[in-house]
Amino acid sequence: MTHGDMTASLFDTADANAPPRSADEILHEVFGFSDFRPGQRDIVEAVLAGGDVLAVMPTGGGKSLCYQLPALIKPGVTIVVSPLIALMRDQVLAMQSQGIAAASLNSANDREDNWRTLQRAIGGDLKLLYISPERLAHVETIERLREAPIAMIAVDEAHCVSQWGHDFRPEYRQIGQIRRDLGIRQTVAFTATADKVTREDIAERLFEADCSVFVRSFDRPNISLAMSQRDDGRAQLLSFLKSHGGEAGVVYCQSRKKVDETAAFLAAKGYNAVPYHAGLTREERDHNQDVFVREDGVIVVATVAFGMGVDKPDVRFVFHMQLPKNIESYYQEIGRAGRDGLPATAHALYGFGEVRQFRQWIEESDAPEAVMEVERQKLNALVRLFEAPACRRVQLLAYFGEATAPCGNCDMCHGTVETFDATVLAQKALSAVARTRERFGMEHLIDVLRGERSEKVEKHGHDTIKTFGVGADQSKKVWRSIFRQLEGIGLAVPDPNDYHAWKISNAGWRVLKGEDTVLLRKDTMSLKDKAPKSSTAAKELPTDYDEALLAALKGLRRELANERDVPAYVVFSDRTLIEMAAKVPQTSDQLRGVHGVGERKLRDYGPAFLDVIRDKASGTA
Ligand code: ADP
Ligand code: ZN
């Protein structure tokens, strides 16, 4: 795309006679979206009003639009500070393909390119200028920007400002000073980190006075949630992939070795799978990430090193082979699925060995006691989420301080995991713990319950207590599952400081005294992914469309994307193609009504897509 082309864009600043357009018009005509996502309108209005704004929105919530859209309305150029060059590049490409005058300034470009870009900003030919924080702090950049008509600074990933956030970037600290220096009136900041301390820190560092703060829900209703115990991990993965054929997804593994093995295993089974971990060379990693982002339906098998800076909206699933590290990590990792708002699936496997191991790591660390206690609580919350016999989303959001009703889009709500009144069983187990004075581990307690006269049982005289043999009707496997669930819902926990002897919590004592009932899961080995593919929570997608037409449209998309050297979704999203295949538009006007088709894309891609649609229609007629 040439610069001449850009200056003749829809936002040609020389076109002073054109009537100003409203936010809604721009949303439809430029972005091709029919509605704002929840929360976007309020934020856009606040940004347009001119004050400082801090918005916390979960990943995939649609933060970018909240500053991109106002940037198109405000006179002058909006400076976007973004920490990741790769991300910047894709965003700029996406905007250019929508006819927006956007460019980036970073160390990956050559000097001359950067110089020309600054010149365009100064000349008023740019609406959005993306800058890395290091580049912004350059004296040279600042000097040149003095001449530019700057509308506002938009700070992406604003938690990087704060040392309380998880990836503190010292250069972010200078943004406030630069703003004063350049006399810029407005700063707007965006992050997916909701934590209150971090929020206050961000506001203090970036803003001069008061700001409007928006905190959106952490719910990602389009992601269906499921967790199951690992039985045979590979078999479970394959069975999951059967119902997710041809979809792009991430499979997370705990170690590099597991990543390599699993990727090779999937490749041998005919899947298009690539590995990703810190042990690969930089070139290999970049290449594999690129393949994943650009090609359709690729599976990336990765350690948690993967994800930061990957902005692929159409990831359809995230599959964990092991228990994630904590709820924050779990949330961040599954958040990479379904950023386009279409149905996506998060399925995690876990084994109790991992829980044990995590507990061990915490106790063996030489962190201060207060830190260890926080880690213990985090682990307990994680186990509760994975083991509790109730809606996953209720548990997950409760952890982030949000109350919600059962979601209807998780394995618990779907009833793929059956629960039953297990008060009596729980009382038996707890009574075994109580009557052996909270001094024994699970296997011994199970022996007592099942009436097994082991050496240890006889040595301690546990064959004489009342609980001896009261659980002989259940197998060891069942009892283990019951203990894990009791731990999950916090009725009793093994104490790692006391040889994993089980202790009863206050809630556990209430059950033992008959003051509370207990619901447990019948089958913690549920391996099937019975969740229906489309959920009511996600925006309805047409299901009645011509598969052959969709395949042809995807083919054209790939061709156009390759020609332009951009990821496929930059041309059109999956949703757009599916709607096309369902509505079968015949004219530009009809095509305009399809999700994601703005004026610029209509002009650039419309004719080619209409050709394919007409071809197919006449072929089948
Ligand atoms: P994040 O909040 O993670 O930065 P993005 O800004 O990247 O999210 O947006 C995530 C996805 O949502 C993108 O594919 C974007 O095009 C899409 N999106 C944003 N706003 C809307 C909207 N109003 N309607 C439909 N899709 C939207
Ligand atoms: Zn639910």
Image (spheres, rainbow, N blue to C red):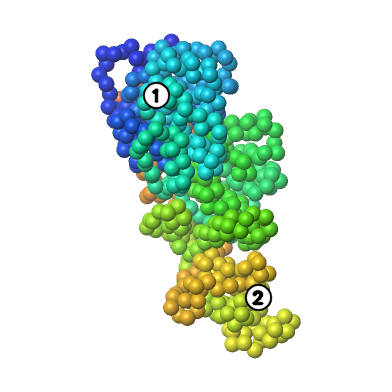
Q: Circle 1 sits in a helix, a strand or a loop, which is it?
A: loop
Above or below: residue 271 compared with residue 110: below
Up/down of 601 relative to 524, above or below:
above
Check if mark 1's residue and mark 2's residue have beta carbons within 8 Å. no
Identity of the residue drawn at 67% across and 44% down: 259
Residue 59: percent from the left, percent from the top? Answer: 46, 41
Specify whether 54 is left or right of 389. Answer: left
Please tell me in which quadrant of the rendered image residue 459 appears: bottom right
Residue 517 point in image, percent of width and height: 44, 75
Which residue does the image show at 38% across and 17% down from the upper left?
149
- Can you identify the residue that label 1 sits on? 184
**Is the C-beta of the residue carrying label 2 under 8 Å from the nearest atom of ligand 2?**
no
From the image, tell me which residue sits under label 2. 440
| Mark 1 Cα-neighbour bin, 10 Å: few <14, some 14–19, many ≥20 | some
Foreground tag (1 vs 2): 1
Residue 52 is labelled as none
Who's the residue at 62% across and 87% down the image?
465
Look at the picture and state if 564 lies above or below 307.
above
Judge whether residue 461 can be spotted in this image: yes
Residue toward you, 176 or 450: 176
What residue type is disc 1 on?
Ile
Q: Which kind of residue does numbered mark 2 sit on?
A: Phe
At 32% from the left and 24% from the top, the residue drawn is 73
